[in-house]
Image: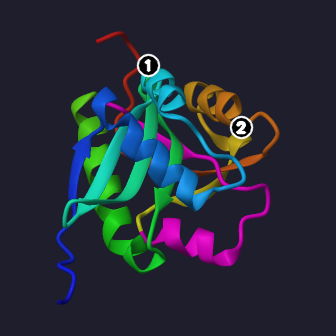
Amino acid sequence: MADSLEIRVRRARPSDAERIAAFVSQRRPRSPITPDQVRERLGTVGFLMAEMNGELVGLLGWQVENLVVRVTDFLIYPARLSLVAGRALLTAMEAAANELMCEAVILVTPRTPPPEVLEFWEAFGYHARDIASLPRAWREAAREANPISDQVMFKQLRTERILHPI
């Protein structure tokens, strides 16, 4: 039977900790994580889960501070679902970020990302930017997310910046 490519995205709950830990640990066996570590992380990072036919196929972790989203975790498996699950996860995260009036999304890549990683993110409207070229609040978020890099992948969500408290 062919897989349905219908991806369902929802926010993770503490009760999902075992599934998330198993999903991450199977993909990264050198550094397995425990359900307790997932529950602890849920206290500081919001997770979106992508499911297909009841199976976990993707995970996106994100934080918001000073109207800037930082993508902290991103994992999709199997790789053949990268585009469809990636689109579903990013669309859900960006919709939630817009509700929160966020101005931009920043994500950290390896210091020298492979071309296919850049192409993947560019397909969703993210572009490499020098941290020094970002406005101060965005620059601070980028430096906090990755203090050793000079670049981040970046997407502006709002054309008008919020310069005064809401």
Amino acid carrying mark 1 in the image = Gly
Q: Magenta includes 158?
A: no
**Disc 2, SS:** loop
Q: Is residue 58 above or below residue 1?
A: above
Query: Residue at the top extreme?
Result: 165
Report x, y in % for residue 40. Answer: 49, 21
Q: Is residue 146 above or below residue 122?
A: above
Which quadrant of the figure contains the N terminus? bottom left
Asked whether, in this view, residue 7 is left or right of residue 134, the answer is left
**Disc 1, SS:** loop
Q: Residues within 10 Å of mark 2 (few under 14, many from 20)?
A: some
Q: Does residue 131 appear in the picture of this structure?
A: yes
Q: Which mark is residue 149?
A: none
- At 52% from the left edge and 51% from the top edge, which residue is drawn? 24
> On the image, numbered disc 1 is attached to which residue?
43
Asked whether, in this view, residue 67 is left or right of residue 71, the answer is left
**In the image shown, does 145 or 68 lie closer to the viewer?**
145
- At 60% from the left edge and 29% from the top edge, which residue is drawn? 141
Q: Is residue 153 above or below residue 83?
A: above
Q: Is residue 31 above or below residue 141?
A: below
> On the image, numbered disc 2 is attached to which residue?
146
Which image quarter: residue 146? top right
**In the image shown, does 42 or 65 lie closer to the viewer?**
42
Query: Residue at the right extreme?
Result: 148
- At 34% from the left edge and 35% from the top edge, which residue is drawn? 160
Report x, y in % for residue 94. Answer: 31, 46
Label 2 and label 1: CA atoms lie apart by 20 Å
**In the image shown, does 68 or 161 lie closer to the viewer?**
68
Q: Which residues are magenta?
A: 101-123
